[in-house]
Image (spheres, helix red, strand yellow):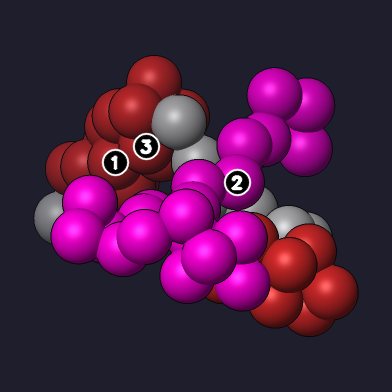
Amino acid sequence: MWNGMKSVMVFDPKDNQVETDRKWREWMEQKSSVGDKYVPTAAETRKYLHELENRKQRYA
């Protein structure tokens, strides 16, 4: 389930190189976005929603 998980960093294009480097170092030190929460893929989300819909029909 964790396989293929990616972390995303967003940089402001207006930032100079010094600010970009600072943000990068801060992110690497905290690693707050890595391992916090698994985000399912689109295919996993569709499968989950489909299963929920099937359960509703079964019990309705």
Q: Is residue 29 left or right of residue 44?
A: right
Magenta segment main secondary structure:
loop
Q: Is mark 2 on a helix, strand or loop?
A: loop
Decide which of 54, 48 is in the foreground and name it: 48
In the picture, which quadrant includes the C terminus?
bottom left
Cα distance between the residues tagged 1 and 3: 6 Å
Residue count near mark 2 (Cα–Cα under 10 Å), binned few <14, some 14–19, many ≥20: few
- The picture quadrant where one finds residue 35 is bottom right
Residue count near mark 1 (Cα–Cα under 10 Å), binned few <14, some 14–19, many ≥20: few
Q: In terms of sequence position, does the residue under pointer 3 or pointer 2 come before the other?
A: 2
Q: Mark 3 points at which residue?
A: 45
Inspect the image, locate mark 3, and give the three-letter code of the amino acid beneath it.
Thr
Q: Mark 2 points at which residue?
A: 7
Inspect the image, locate mark 1, and give the three-letter code of the amino acid beneath it.
Leu
Decide which of 7, 28 is in the foreground and name it: 28
Which residue is rendered at x = 70% and y = 24% of the image? 4
- The picture quadrant where one finds residue 33 is bottom right
Decide which of 54, 22 is in the foreground and name it: 22
Q: Is residue 22 left or right of residue 35?
A: left
Q: Is mark 1 on a helix, strand or loop?
A: helix
Q: In terms of sequence position, does the residue under pointer 1 or pointer 2 come before the other?
A: 2
Q: Where is residue 13 in the image (x, y as percent from the top left)?
A: 22, 51
Stretch of the chain drawn in magenta:
1-22
In the picture, which quadrant includes the N terminus?
top right
Residue 59 seen by the camera: no
Q: Residue 15 in magenta?
A: yes
Which residue is rendered at x = 29% and y = 41% of the image? 49
**Is label 1 in contact with label 3 (beta carbons under 8 Å)?**
yes
Q: Where is residue 21 in the image (x, y as percent from the top left)?
A: 61, 60
Q: Name the residue under label 1.
A: 49
Q: Where is residue 34 in the image (x, y as percent from the top left)?
A: 73, 59
Cα distance between the residues tagged 1 and 2: 24 Å
